[in-house]
Image: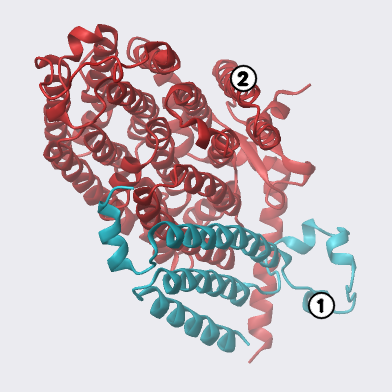
């Protein structure tokens, strides 16, 4: 499972890096969004059953009682924390995506282009 | 009511004011009053708590959110390091905010300017207080989001096109941060700073190696924080960013944004990622030292080569960041104290210079040095304020920059990093040169020939009153840091001690009971792991 996930992470990373080398702001933005997904996937790949200290300290906590198999406690739970991290990262990613896309729309309205070369020329002109 | 409960106010006050500010979109005056009250409240609270902590033996206040025990819930920690930075940043924010009343475009002001400043400070305060790595990421994002908005406020073409550099770079940096946080969790099973520090120091005490790849992880995080802090190879986004936005906001950015990156290094590296003599430390320390030398020296050379006040000041931020990295690279407790003192004095002084630059721009209509002049006669008060701030930046003895540089450079000499100290001294001399350049062109030279004084372009001095108030406030703080360096340094030494020997921090955040539980749990899981290994073959 981890190997499949790590191959996925590598592919998504490669695609996003390819997109980010483009000369269009749209493709760069898409590359950045994909990079965020690659990061989330890599966190999933690192999540695992808790091995260190969670069960002892969180015994009886509601988060673990549901679906808890008393016969084999270690196999029935996964670490909830990486999933909480990913959830937070996704929400933040949404906000950033919304901001970046609206910035793209505003830029193309103001300057009429989203190509990096042309924007470099436009930047030196006055409003 | 216990003192710990006050800490959360640093986060709640700016957040609440920001939310109320969204509702007060059209009522600019009420929003202004509320904003000033919010910053006054946080700075008073920070100073009050710092004064209280001076007599407190532990010196660390911890609040566990929702009463979840430390390594699982979110800890909010107020120690000497975060306290000093909170006090300085709240004062700087107050001054820049007041200054912005006379520089902000009235149309732009109604586009949620006030909530954005508050949310920026919400992110900054959270970053200074938070006790775990992922929450640090969240606070970075809040702060960056607000800074993206403030950066593109005017909506001009130049701002639009320059913003991409900053926004995209920071997005990539944030993604790297998420991956880094995930890796930290995968390797150590915790994200809490205190628990991480415990993990590292326990392993070192037992002579065990850290997990494989820990050094690579340290470098990845150094890259992330270095990008935010604009250290040597990662500083190229900074000059353009500070050049295009409103001058009060540029002052606020110059005070806050880079310092938060440096703070993140100061918080995590001495305690965790480069603690003691681990492999990670052996890689990170030389990197920091080399980066410090280049950041200081190339930054100041860039500043000398520019011929435009705002660009000189912006490039100068980089050079000053180099001194802080110098302090971090030594990582002794005296050097860390020097680094902290330098950080707060630089926040105050650099923002003050930007605020002065805003007034100069209003007087002359330009920030080109060739076209301005004669300001000494026209506005003596401004000249005095600028001179004090500029000499503090250079580090002339009774002023604040001197004490910061003195401690860092002397400590560098003692730790046999003499070449870095020489770079520091050289940079100081070139700083003087670049500040004198502004001084002689802008203030000392006879009136600029190209400006014609007509009633139309005469500055409206009454509308500049808030700008003078802001600059005066900061110059007073700078003078206090110079003449009252003793009490500030006492707190800074304490912070350096807490960073270099993290036992007190670990004890305060986790508490003896949790530490005992963790030790037992670790022993059990180690026994389980060895049992599993024996079963598998």
Q: CA distance from mark 1 to mark 2?
A: 55 Å
Q: Which chain is cyan?
A: A
> With A82 as the anchor, is B227 left or right in this view?
left
Q: Are marks 1 and 2 on the same chain?
A: no
Quadrant of res B376: top left
Q: Is residue B487 visible?
A: no
x and y, in percent, of residue A4 in the image: 58, 89
Quadrant of res B191: bottom right
Q: Quadrant of the C terminus of chain B?
A: bottom right
The residue positioned farthest toward the bottom in the image shown: B537
Circle 1 sits in a helix, a strand or a loop, which is it?
Answer: helix
Q: Which dot marks residue B33?
A: 2
* Vertical arrangement, residue B28 with respect to residue B419, above or below: above
Q: Name the residue at 50% across, 62% down.
A: A105
Give the camera-side residue of B83 and B415. B83
Crowd band around label 2 with a 10 angstrom C-alpha radius: few (<14), some (14–19), many (20+): few
x and y, in percent, of residue B73 in the image: 72, 49
Q: Chain of mark 2?
A: B
Badge nearest the viewer, 1 or 2:
2
x and y, in percent, of residue B96 in the image: 45, 26
Q: Which dot marks residue A76?
A: 1
Determine contact: label 1, label 2, CB under 8 Å.
Answer: no
Q: Name the residue at 48% across, 83% down.
A: A10
Q: Name the residue at 37% across, 32% down.
A: B247
In the rendered image of the structure, the colour used to display chain B is: red
Q: Name the residue at 32% across, 17% down.
A: B459
Q: Chain of mark 1?
A: A
């Amino acid at each position: 499972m981890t190997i499949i996930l790590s191959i996925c992470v590598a592919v998504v990373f490669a695609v996003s890096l390819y997109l980010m080398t483009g000369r269009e702001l749209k493709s760069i933005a898409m590359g950045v969004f994909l990079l965020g997904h690659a990061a989330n996937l890599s966190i999933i790949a690192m999540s695992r059953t808790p091995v260190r200290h969670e069960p002892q300290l969180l015994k009886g906590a509601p988060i673990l009682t549901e679906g808890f198999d008393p016969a084999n406690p270690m196999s029935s739970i996964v670490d909830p924390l990486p999933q909480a991290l990913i959830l937070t990262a996704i929400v933040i990613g949404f906000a950033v995506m919304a901001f970046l896309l609206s910035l793209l729309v505003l830029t193309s309205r103001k300057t009429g282009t989203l190509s990096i070369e042309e924007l470099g020329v436009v930047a030196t002109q006055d409003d | 009511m216990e003192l710990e409960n006050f800490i959360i106010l640093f986060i709640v006050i700016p957040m609440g004011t920001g939310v109320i500010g969204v509702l007060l979109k059209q009522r600019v005056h009420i929003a202004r009053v509320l904003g000033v009250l919010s910053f006054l409240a946080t700075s008073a609270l920070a100073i009050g708590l710092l004064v209280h902590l001076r007599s407190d033996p532990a010196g660390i206040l911890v609040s566990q959110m929702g009463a979840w025990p430390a390594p699982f819930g979110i800890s909010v920690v107020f120690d000497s390091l975060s306290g000093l930075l909170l006090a300085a940043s709240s004062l700087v924010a107050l001054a820049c905010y007041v200054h912005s009343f006379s520089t902000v475009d009235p149309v732009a002001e109604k586009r949620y300017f006030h909530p954005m400043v508050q949310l920026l400070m919400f992110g900054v305060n959270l970053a200074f207080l938070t006790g775990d790595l992922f929450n640090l990421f969240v606070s970075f994002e809040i702060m960056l989001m607000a800074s993206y908005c403030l950066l593109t406020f005017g909506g001009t073409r130049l701002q639009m096109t320059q913003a991409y550099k900053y926004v995209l770079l920071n997005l990539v940096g944030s993604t790297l941060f998420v991956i880094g946080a995930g890796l930290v969790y995968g390797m150590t099973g915790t994200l809490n700073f205190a628990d991480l520090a415990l993990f590292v120091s326990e392993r070192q005490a037992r002579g065990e190696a850290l997990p494989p790849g820990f050094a690579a992880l340290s470098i990845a995080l150094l890259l992330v924080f270095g990008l935010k802090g604009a250290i040597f190879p990662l500083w190229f986004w900074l000059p353009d960013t500070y050049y295009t936005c409103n001058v009060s906001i540029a002052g606020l950015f110059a005070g806050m944004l880079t310092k938060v990156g440096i703070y993140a290094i100061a918080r995590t590296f001495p305690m965790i990622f480069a603690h003691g003599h681990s492999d990670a430390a052996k890689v990170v320390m030389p990197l920091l030292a080399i980066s410090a030398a280049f950041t200081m020296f190339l930054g100041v050379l860039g500043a000398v080569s520019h011929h435009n006040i705002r660009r000189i000041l912006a490039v100068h931020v980089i050079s000053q960041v180099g001194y802080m990295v110098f302090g971090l690279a030594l990582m002794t407790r005296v050097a860390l104290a020097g680094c902290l003192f330098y950080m707060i004095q630089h926040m105050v002084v650099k923002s003050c210079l930007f605020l002065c630059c805003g007034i100069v721009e209003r007087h002359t209509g330009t920030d080109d040095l060739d076209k301005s002049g004669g300001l000494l006669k026209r506005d003596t008060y401004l000249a005095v304020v600028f001179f004090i701030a500029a000499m503090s930046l250079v580090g002339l003895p009774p002023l604040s920059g001197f004490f910061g540089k003195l401690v860092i450079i002397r400590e560098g000499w003692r730790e046999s990093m003499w070449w870095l100290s020489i770079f520091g001294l050289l940079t100081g001399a070139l700083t003087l040169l670049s500040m004198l350049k502004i001084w002689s062109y802008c203030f000392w030279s006879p009136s600029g020939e190209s400006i014609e004084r007509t009633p139309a372009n005469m500055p409206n001095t009454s509308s500049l009153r808030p700008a003078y108030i802001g600059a005066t406030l900061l110059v007073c703080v700078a003078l206090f840091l110079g003449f009252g360096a003793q009490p500030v340094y006492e707190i800074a030494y304490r912070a350096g001690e807490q960073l270099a020997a993290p036992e007190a921090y670990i004890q305060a955040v986790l508490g003896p009971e949790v530490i005992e539980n963790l030790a037992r749990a670790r022993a059990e899981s180690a026994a389980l792991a060895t049992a599993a290994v024996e079963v598998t073959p």
